[in-house]
Image (spheres, rainbow, N blue to C red):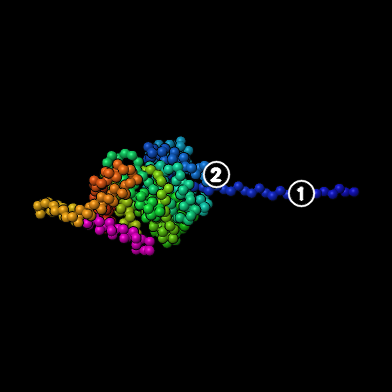
């Protein structure tokens, strides 16, 4: 008699392991051997690296480097992407890297771009990913100034502290995704690239590059692009980092002139739209401030040179008192010593300096003078 056999069911296939989300970290670098180590050490210390569901890929975009930046980057455990024939500075280098690396990523992955002279605080990536999951198209950083730079550096640190306070009070609402550090969902970057190719956004390099290589402020322009595609941006108070300050007045002048002229030209580039009208309003207010400053300083000169002396009215003393309180309160993040110093209004030096920079930027834009990075 044949023996009955029992056929056991085949074992169910083991579920495929869930692919960890990749965060591609791009560090654009041109001759940054003095700072690239600090930047990469801060990235390797990110708490997100302890999460098995997240994989950080550190890549230094070495753009026309003639120093030891690529070698130092590799020594700190980063991949190095070396640009070829790039003539478009940071934006061009990032476009080359993104064109090569984005196809390797999924739509649910993210790209973090951070400057080589910056050091992200340990929770930056983890906190930024949380905002990406909430649906934001871009997540920027809130920065503080590094030590150094003498009096000029001190003024910048106060300025950055006020910016951090403003962003915190607005619960992360910001006008611009800062170039110091910003995270974007991959699907959003692909959308921007496709929109440029379709003529729905400024064409940039004409090849669907994520960044516009024709502008002075590529981060400001990318913010405009994201908002015109219906995406919101945010700079959360818990996405913090440190960045270098300009070491002298000449360097600060070049930096701010580029920022200001770039912002003005981005407004002309996009025209008056549902997104840009607020930016146009800020430009008009800034221009009005330049005019008022010129009139104010001119009236002092006239009073001393022609009228024989200044006459201080009680009303203007009261107005001055309001400004003193504002200076003191808004620098609170830097401690009580800086608050006491701020009461002397010595920071008017920086205010007048920036007003002059704004005036020069407006003139250069209107007269279409040659742009300089």
What is the x, y in percent for residue 180?
39, 47
**Crowd rating for badge 1 (residues with CA inside 10 Å; few <14, some 14–19, many 20+):** few
**Is residue 94 shown to the viewer in this render?**
no
Q: Give 104 or 233, whichever is nearer the viewer.
A: 233
What is the x, y in percent for residue 147?
33, 39
Could you say whether the residue bearing mark 1 is in a helix, strand or loop?
Answer: loop
In the image, is residue 281 above or below residue 91?
Answer: below
- Mark count: 2
Of mark 2 and mark 1, the one earlier in the sequence is 1
- Going 41% across and 46% down the picture, which residue do you hit? 240
- Going 46% across and 48% down the picture, which residue do you hit? 127
Label number found at residue 8: 1
In the image, is residue 293 above or below residue 242?
Answer: below
Q: Give 103 or 265, whichever is nearer the viewer.
A: 265
Q: Give 144 or 366, whichever is nearer the viewer.
A: 144
Query: From which residue to which does the magenta span run?
Result: 270-294
Could you say whether the residue bearing mark 2 is in a helix, strand or loop?
Answer: loop
Side of 195 relative to 363 (left or right): right
Side of 258 relative to 184 (left or right): left
What is the x, y in percent for residue 13?
67, 49
Q: CA distance from mark 2 to mark 1?
A: 36 Å
What is the x, y in percent for residue 48?
49, 44
**Crowd rating for badge 2 (residues with CA inside 10 Å; few <14, some 14–19, many 20+):** few
Label 2 belongs to which residue? 52
147 drawn magenta: no
Task: State which quadrant residue 333 falls in.
Answer: top left
**Is residue 144 shown to the viewer in this render?**
yes
- Going 28% across and 49% down the picture, which residue do you hit? 327
Q: Overall secondary structure of the magenta stretch? A: helix
- Going 39% across and 57% down the picture, which residue do you hit? 224
Q: Give 149 or 65, whichever is nearer the viewer.
A: 149
């Amino acid at each position: 008699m044949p023996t009955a056999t029992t056929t056991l069911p085949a074992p169910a296939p083991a579920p495929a392991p869930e692919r960890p989300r990749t965060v591609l970290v791009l560090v654009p670098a041109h001759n940054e051997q003095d700072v690239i180590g600090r930047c990469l050490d801060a990235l390797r210390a990110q708490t997100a690296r302890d999460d098995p569901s997240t994989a950080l890929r550190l890549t230094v975009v070495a753009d026309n480097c003639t120093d030891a930046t690529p070698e130092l980057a590799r020594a700190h455990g980063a991949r190095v992407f070396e640009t070829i024939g790039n003539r478009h500075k940071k934006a061009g280098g990032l476009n080359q890297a993104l064109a090569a690396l984005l196809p390797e990523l999924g739509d649910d992955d993210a790209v973090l771009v951070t400057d080589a002279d910056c050091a992200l605080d340990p929770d930056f990536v983890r906190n930024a990913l949380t905002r990406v999951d909430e649906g934001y198209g871009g997540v920027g950083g809130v920065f503080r100034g590094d030590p150094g730079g003498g009096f000029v550096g001190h003024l910048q640190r106060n300025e950055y502290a006020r910016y951090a306070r403003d962003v915190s009070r607005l619960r992360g609402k910001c006008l611009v995704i800062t170039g110091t550090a910003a995270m974007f969902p991959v699907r959003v970057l692909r959308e921007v690239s496709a929109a440029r190719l379709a003529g729905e956004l400024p064409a940039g390099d004409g090849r669907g590059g994520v960044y516009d290589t024709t502008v002075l402020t590529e981060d400001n322009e990318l913010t405009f692009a994201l908002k015109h595609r219906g995406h919101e941006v945010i700079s959360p108070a818990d996405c913090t980092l440190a960045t270098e300050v300009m070491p002298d007045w000449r360097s600060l002048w070049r930096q701010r002139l580029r920022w200001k002229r770039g912002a003005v030209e981005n407004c002309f580039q996009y025209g008056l739209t549902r997104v840009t009208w607020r930016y146009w309003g800020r430009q008009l207010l800034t221009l009005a401030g330049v005019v008022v400053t010129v009139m104010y300083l001119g009236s002092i000169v006239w009073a001393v040179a022609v009228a024989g002396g200044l006459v201080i009215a009680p009303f203007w003393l009261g107005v001055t008192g309001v400004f003193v309180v504002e200076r003191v309160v808004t620098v609170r993040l830097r401690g009580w010593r800086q608050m006491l110093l701020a009461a002397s209004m010595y920071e008017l030096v920086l205010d007048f300096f920036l007003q002059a920079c704004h005036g020069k930027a407006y003139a250069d834009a209107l007269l279409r003078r040659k742009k300089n990075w």
